Amino acid sequence: MKVHNEPLSDVIRYLDQKKDLTLEDMRPDYESYLRVVRQFMELTPQTRMLEIGTGTGWFPLLCKLEGLTCKGLEISPQLIEHARELGRKYGVEPDIELGNIEEYHLEADYFDAVIANSVFEHIEHWPNALQHVYRTLKPGGIFFFISTNKFSLKSYEYDFPLYGWLPDQWRYRLRIARQGPDIMKLGIDFNQFTYPGLRRAFRQAGFSKSYDRVQVMDLSRFSGLKRTAGQILKTIPPIKGTFLLFSGATLFVCIK
């Protein structure tokens, strides 16, 4: 992956889709992030967080408005400029730097938490990026990871039947044919992940523990049938495995 200063079609499409979103619209997602992180650490103004792939910038902006510290790393200059424009509407300046996580130098043992939502599927050489994340986390720090699930029945990357199931080269050709060749510069999902494959990758990177989306599920927020279903997922491994195999995304919290 490279930083491209020229306007790219997928960024233009993305910003057109998000142009009317406000920070208030994103607050439920913001709160859901923090609920997960708070299961593993207390968040204070001194907690150092990093978001990889900031998109429109809503997470670091809301953090700053709420008195929390979150640095951003984003590969698209156009998305950084959008985040700054959005911040100006609220009187805040986001702390977002331009860079590619595959090669960007992050200080070792520095961050308490790193967040990457819908990012690693777009990182061509993602094991390099994972090593950089591991290196920059403090001992005991957490990596909150959300990305694609290859065998999801519905893809959030592209609306095409069983899209994630396709071999990589088939997906690339499909997207190029429908969206143009610059989709390969930014926007393509180079990777479709699986839960077993990610568990191995996190272990090989050095993380001491990794918790999947069922393990971090907070049943206290549910009642009735939803709570019963959650309890079944947590206690019956074959049912949990089937749920994870076809779930809409891969989600992990990893501990350094």
Image (cartoon, rainbow, N blue to C red):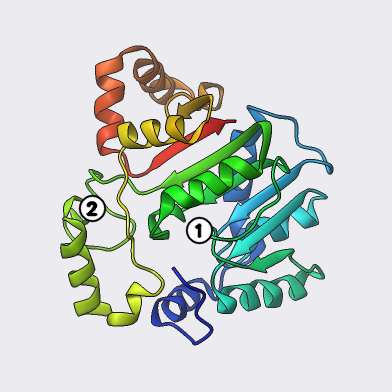
Which numbered disc, 2 or 1, marks the residue that appears first in the sequence? 1
Q: Is residue 78 left or right of residue 47?
A: left
Q: Is residue 108 left or right of residue 13?
A: right
Look at mark 2 in the image and give the residue it sits on. 164
Residue drawn at point x = 40 percent, y = 76 percent = 10
Residue drawn at point x = 40 percent, y = 60 percent = 122
Residue drawn at point x = 31 percent, y = 31 percent = 196
Q: Nearer the viewer, residue 148 or 132?
A: 132
Q: From the image, state whether disc 2 or disc 1 is nearer to you.
A: 1
Neighbour tally class for label 1: few under 14, some 14-19, many 20 plus, Cα within 10 Å: some
Look at mark 1 in the image and give the residue it sits on. 102
Q: Tell me if residue 33 comes above or below residue 187 in the rendering.
A: above
Taking the view exactly as shown, the residue that stands out farthest to the bottom is 6
Q: Is residue 237 visible?
A: yes
Residue 69: x percent and y percent?
Answer: 78, 50
Q: Tell me if residue 185 comes above or below residue 170 in the rendering.
A: below
Please state, as top left, top right, bottom left or bottom right, where the N terminus lies in the image.
bottom left
Q: Is residue 32 visible?
A: no
Neighbour tally class for label 2: few under 14, some 14-19, many 20 plus, Cα within 10 Å: many
Residue type highlighted by circle 2: Gly
Q: Tell me if residue 101 comes above or below residue 219 in the rendering.
A: below
Taking the view exactly as shown, the residue that stands out farthest to the top is 235
Distance between the alpha carbons at the discs numbered 2 and 1: 23 Å
Please state, as top left, top right, bottom left or bottom right, where the C terminus lies in the image.
top right
Q: Is residue 142 left or right of residue 118?
A: right
Residue type highlighted by circle 1: Glu
Instruction: Please identify the quarter of the rendering in which residue 5 is found.
Output: bottom right
Element type at mark 1: loop
Element type at mark 2: helix
Q: Is residue 56 left or right of residue 121?
A: right
Residue 110: x percent and y percent?
Answer: 73, 43
Instruction: Please identify the quarter of the rendering in which residue 179 is found.
Output: bottom left
